[in-house]
Amino acid sequence: MKKKALSLILCSAVVAGSLAGCGGSSAPAADGPVADAGPEGKTLNIYCWNEEFKSRLTDHYPGYVVVDGTHGTIGDVNVVWNITPSDDNAYQKNLDENLLKQDGAAADDRIDMFLVEADYALKYVDTPYTMSVADLGITEAELANQYQYTKDVMTDSSGVLKGLSWQGCPGVLIYNREAAEAVLGSQEPADVQEFVKDWATWNDTADKMKAAGYNMVATVNDAYRVYSNNVSGKWVQDGKIVIDKNVEQWVKDSKALVDKGETTTAELWSDDWSKGFYPDGKVFCYFGPAWLINFSMAADVEGSIANQGGWGAVEGPQGFFWGGTWICGATGTDNPLLVADIMRQLTTNEQIMADIVKKDSDFVNNKAAMEAAATKDEYAFAVLGGQNPLSMFCAGAGKIDLSNQSEYDQGCNEEFQHAMKNYFDGNAATYEDALALFYQGVKEKYPELSY
């Protein structure tokens, strides 16, 4: 991408997730390693979309002092949190607008650090607005224990690493133990895995579950990420939209499940999606990483399956990942030493990362820390009835391949699922009609693409 890319947010035809098009402002380039940096600034401005990273920093970074909900101190540096929710891409819009002002902003007003997610990471990685990790003084040797995919996410087209994460988010299949016992004859993970070991077997098991009164999965959207994480090529190749065979398989399998009443087309995070968190919801399984298991399945709600320790975990048909948050140093920061130390402490300090596992139940981005935790009963998940799934997460994290990631992923995935919902629900008569809706939606976001 060109230096002007972020100026798209100021164009009249702005579309979330796309950074191609209009001309505009440029950011200052990094002028050497952080070791050559001058005096540090007095204000550290951090941009993010929720409290997650804030809690990691306030709870685990040495010397952080809380002032109030949006301010803190580290030594004599004031920490200012700029938190904008992600709804309707508000976070990205706010971030983009302020990054465009970076080169003309007063030192105390500049963005020093900001957070990105995998779905739109490349939007920022392939621009001059993110600092090279090497220029921040962090060496490859320090990152040796990090999972490779977490580095691949933040590596630009020239092979330069532009951000780091304290967490990994490999996923597993999370199944209802009671349903497994009743329908499959066993709730033990090794036995259940045989019934979901590939998509053909998965579809056969869905028939068994339906006969017993269970939906196989809450919604077709639960499984989408598993299919789309295992594609053989990028969404866009030589400027042309390409639909991968594995994504087409998701359409075929999902259409069959919907037509047989074995799942729904509900949106993720909707009430219809989450009703399976309770016994009366009659849902056999969900797909998700550690954060979904521990924080998003109503574990604190009396009567939920999670509260009763009624879920189990297996690898499922294919490996995948969901989510993750990466720390970026903003080009132009007047606090490069502090930015570098925060990144170093939260993503390479094994003791701090082990503490994050214990306190926050995060799967952290450190092979040594996670492999050690995978062997200890103290890291068992109460939600999973005392099962320790970390060995599965470790194995999954090591297999994640992001070679087919592209800057168009967020927009293409959103439009594809939206269009196929019309097909599954009967609002688009044929698959070809749904494809037409998809291409129309993508062209509105990315007019430079063909199909």
Image (cartoon, rainbow, N blue to C red):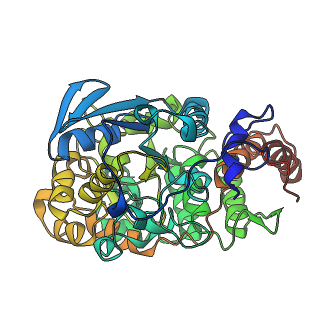
Q: Please give the count of numbered marks on the rendered protein.
A: 0
Farthest top residue? 68
- Residue 415 position within the rendered picture, expressed as x and y whole percent measured from the top left: 73, 45
Can residue 91 be seen in the rendering of this structure? yes
Can residue 386 be seen in the rendering of this structure? no
- Residue 176 position within the rendered picture, expressed as x and y whole percent measured from the top left: 36, 50
Query: Relative to residue 338, is residue 152 drawn left or right?
Result: right
Please identify the quadrant where the C terminus is shown: bottom right
Farthest front residue? 38
Q: Is residue 334 above or below residue 315?
A: above
Query: Relative to residue 378, is residue 146 drawn left or right?
Result: right
Q: Which sits in the foreground, 175 or 280?
A: 175
Q: Residue at x 39, y 36 (%)?
A: 45
Q: Residue at x 52, y 31 (%)?
A: 270
Please identify the quadrant where the N terminus is shown: bottom right
Q: Is residue 397 above or below residue 266?
A: below
- Residue 171 position within the rendered picture, expressed as x and y whole percent measured from the top left: 42, 59
Image quadrant assignment for residue 102: top right
- Residue 154 position within the rendered picture, expressed as x and y whole percent measured from the top left: 50, 62
Q: Which sits in the foreground, 75 or 122?
A: 75
Image quadrant assignment for residue 77: top left
